[in-house]
Image: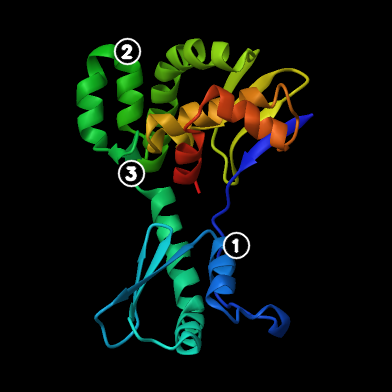
Amino acid sequence: MSCAYKFYAKRYDVVVYPSSNTPKTVAELIVYFASHGITLCIQKKSVKHLNFRLTQSTLKVSVPSDIDEQVLVDGIYAKIPWAIRSYHALMVEKLHRDTLWGESLDVANWLNIHQANLPCRTLGYLKKLPKQALITWIYRYEIKQQLPSLLSQWQPKVGKKAAAIRLRQMSSRWGSCNTLSAKITLNTHLASYPLGCLAYVLVHELCHLYHANHSANFWKSVENAMPDYKYWHDLLK
């Protein structure tokens, strides 16, 4: 059996609201936005109009302190298509940003720093690669460098061992685990996020060796091994 930890970069060109599901209160708007991965944060301030600002996965709305709730609901409701399109654009940009362990990646500088550790033939090969192919190679290399210490740290905490770790480019999941063979596959793009995200996905997949599902017991296993897992989990949304 194979278990996968998935992520989605959805596109919403047209947003349709079934009449029966139209948000009618602030609470329903909060739930609606949350279902699309967006946290709605409403702040009462000394402003005359509703002001909207989307940062990462949070939609911040500054509103007049004396605003009528129905006016507030209608105003936010009208911004739903814009908010979801903007959120999608941010997620796509995030997926394609040149970063390494959460920091900006200067490919030329990386090659200069690592050239002493790379065979001349490999270095020559890398310099001929298109940029995206080179970044993918760097991600694989960096993850391989980190895996020995991560495995020695987290396998004992989880209480399970992976029979093998494979790295792959994947478009819809951060990792997967074959629970029969105990082989784990990790997304190479994890190297673009802070190292804690890679550690979290590794723990996540190791815990599937106990539970081949996402039950409450599974998440308890994850939390027991990594108490702050929710922080890293949320960075990967």
CA separation in Å, label 3 and label 1: 28 Å
Foreground label between 3 and 1: 1
Considering depth in this image, is 119 or 157 the residue closer to the camera? 157
Q: Which residue is mark 3?
A: 98
Q: Are marks 3 and 1 in contact (CB under 8 Å)?
A: no
The quarter of the image holding the N terminus is: top right
Q: Earlier in the sequence, mark 3 or mark 1?
A: 1
As helix, strand or loop, the secondary structure at mark 3 comes to loop
| Label 1: few (<14), some (14–19) or many (≥20) C-alpha neighbours in 10 Å | few
Examine the rendering and report whether any part of residue 167 can be seen: no
Q: Which residue is mark 1?
A: 35
Examine the rendering and report whether any part of residue 31 can be seen: yes
Foreground label between 3 and 2: 3
The residue drawn where x is 34% and y is 41% is 131
As helix, strand or loop, the secondary structure at mark 1 comes to helix
Q: Which residue is mark 2?
A: 119
Amino acid beneath label 1: Ser
Q: Quadrant of residue 221?
A: top right
| Label 2: few (<14), some (14–19) or many (≥20) C-alpha neighbours in 10 Å | few
Q: Earlier in the sequence, mark 3 or mark 2?
A: 3
Residue 137 location, x and y as percent? 41, 30
Q: Quadrant of residue 177?
A: top right
Amino acid beneath label 2: Pro
The circle on residue 120 is: none
Where is 152 relative to 101, above or below?
above
As helix, strand or loop, the secondary structure at mark 2 comes to loop
